[in-house]
Image (tube, coloured by chain):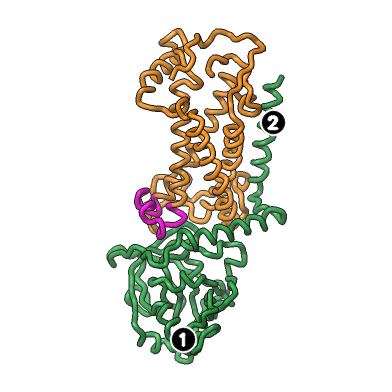
Chain colours: A orange, B green
Amino acid sequence: MSASPAPAVTPAPAARQVRRHHWIVRLTHWLTFVVVLGMIASGLQIYAAYAKFGERNGPYYVNPFQERAFPDAVRLGGWLAGGLNWHFALAWPLVFGGLLYLAYLVASGEWRSLLFRPRDLRGAIEMQKYYLRLRKDHPPQGKHNPLQKLAYTFIVGVGALAVLSGFAVYKPTQLSWLTWLFGGFQAARYWHFWGVWIFTGFLIVHVVLVFVVDPASLRAMISGWYRGRFPSHD
Amino acid sequence: MTDRRDFLRLMAGAGTASLLAACGWDGGNAVRPALLDVSRINDWVGEKILFSPRRLAREYPISERTAHLPSYFVSREMPILTNPSAWRLQVGGLVRKPLSLSVADLQAMPSTTYTVKHHCVEGWSAIATWHGVPVSAIAERCELLPQARYVRFDSFDSGYSNGWDMASAMHPQTMLAYGMNDNPLPPTHGAPLRLYSPTKLGYKMTKYLVSVTFTAERPGGYWEDQGYPWFGGV
C-alpha cells in the first residue's frame, strides 16, 4: 500500500504537522500498554503457585523459569487470590480495548495500512535490504512500511492468542474445544506464558525503535499530531 | 524539547505501573473491594454464560490416572472421625424431608462413577476416578422447596465449607464421593465423604462432609471469603 509515493527520507519543512492517530487508536494504545503490564505482573504472581508446565510428576514443557519465583517487584496481587482477581479484572479492559481498536480499524478502513498481507512480502524484503544497507533509497511506503505492518499484525495476532489461551486455561471444561486446540490444559498454560516473553520483547524493540528512528512518533501517539522526519508516511 | 517532555510523561506512566506491581500489591483498601466487585461480575459470567448445566466434562480411560493427586486440609492435623459408624450426612435447609444418611445409605443409592481431570486453582491438574451419588439424586430425595437457590456444604475440617449455585450442584457430574480410584475414599481426600465435580476448581469441592444445606441466600466459603472467586468453575 503506497498511499503517497513521495520520496521518504527528504527532510520535511520544520513546521509541517500531520494528523496521524485517531483518539481511539491513542486511547487503546495506552490502555493496552498499562493493562498488559498489569496482566504480566499479575500473571507472574499466579505463576508462583505452580511454577511449571505439565501434569504432576512431569514431563514438563521446556521452561527456564521452572520452579522459580519472580521477584516481588514484578508481581501484582500479593498472593494467588489477589493475582487472580487483578488478572481477571484487567482481562475486561484488555479484551474490550482490543475489540474497540479492531472495530475502529475495520470501520475506518485503516486496517489496510496495518494488516500484513502476502503482497507485502516483496516490500518487506526491499525494506529489509534497505535496513541492511543493501539498498540505498528508502522504498516508498504508506503510513507504515511492510516490516512495520508485519510487526503490528504479528503483535495483534499474539494478543488474540494470549486472550484465547487465557480462556482455555480459565474454563478448560466449559471451553474444552478451545483448550483442546491449544493442546490441553497444561499446554494452554504454557502458550499463555509465552505471551509474557513475546509482549516483553515487542515492548523493548518497539520503544527502542521509537527513540532511535523517529522520536516524534511518540508525541503523535499522545497528541495525535505528527511533526517529524516522515510526514509523507501519512 | 517536546520529545523529552513526552518521554518523561511516558516514564511517569511506566513508573506508576511498576509501582503498582512493586511489593506484590493486592490493591490495598482502596482497590481490593473494586477487584472483588469485578470478581462477582466474573462469577455471574461464569455461571450464566460460560457454564452449561448439561455439558459433560471429558472422561478419561483408567490407564490415564495420575500417580499422585495432591490433597490438603485446613486443620492442624488430618481430620479423622473418632467413631466412623456414628457419622451421618445431614441434609436439610429448604427441603420438605430432611435426611440423615449413613455411608451405607449413600452406597445403597444409585451410584455414578467417572475418571476425570482435576483442575487446581494453583495451575496443576491430575486425573482420578471418583465413585459416589449424584447431588441431584439427594436433592430429589429430600424434596427441595422452590425457594432453594444455593447449596452449602459443611465439613468437620475446622469449619471448611463451600457455597454452590444450584445449577452447578445439580449438574449430572456433581457427586458426593465415597470412593476414589476403586477404593473407599481415603482420609487424605476427605473420608468418609466429599463433594466432587469436574466443572469446579478443587477448592470448591468440600472434603470431610457433615452436612448439605439448601438455602435461599448465597453462602460464603472458606477460600471464597478470603478473596478467591466464588463461582470457581472450570
Q: What chain is tagged by disc 1?
A: B
Q: Which residue is mark 2?
A: B9
Q: Position of residue B153 (x, y in %)?
A: 52, 77
Please tell me whether residue A109 is drawn above or below residue B69 in the rendered image.
above
Task: Quote the CA–CA distance across marks 1 and 2.
Answer: 65 Å
Amino acid beneath label 2 = Arg
Highlighted magenta segment, given as a residue range:
A168-187
Q: Quadrant of the N terminus of chain A?
A: top left
Please give the label number shown on residue A35.
none
Which residue sits at x=56%, y=19%? A213
The residue beneath circle 1 is: B142
Q: Is residue B161 visible?
A: yes
User: What is the quadrant of residue A122 in the picture?
Assistant: top left
Q: Residue at horizontal 58%, vertical 71%?
A: B221
Q: Looking at the image, is B51 positioned above or below residue A138?
A: below
| Number of other residues with Cα within 10 Å of mark 1, as a class: few under 14, some 14 to 19, many 20 or more | some
Kindly tell me whether residue B192 is visible in this rendering: no
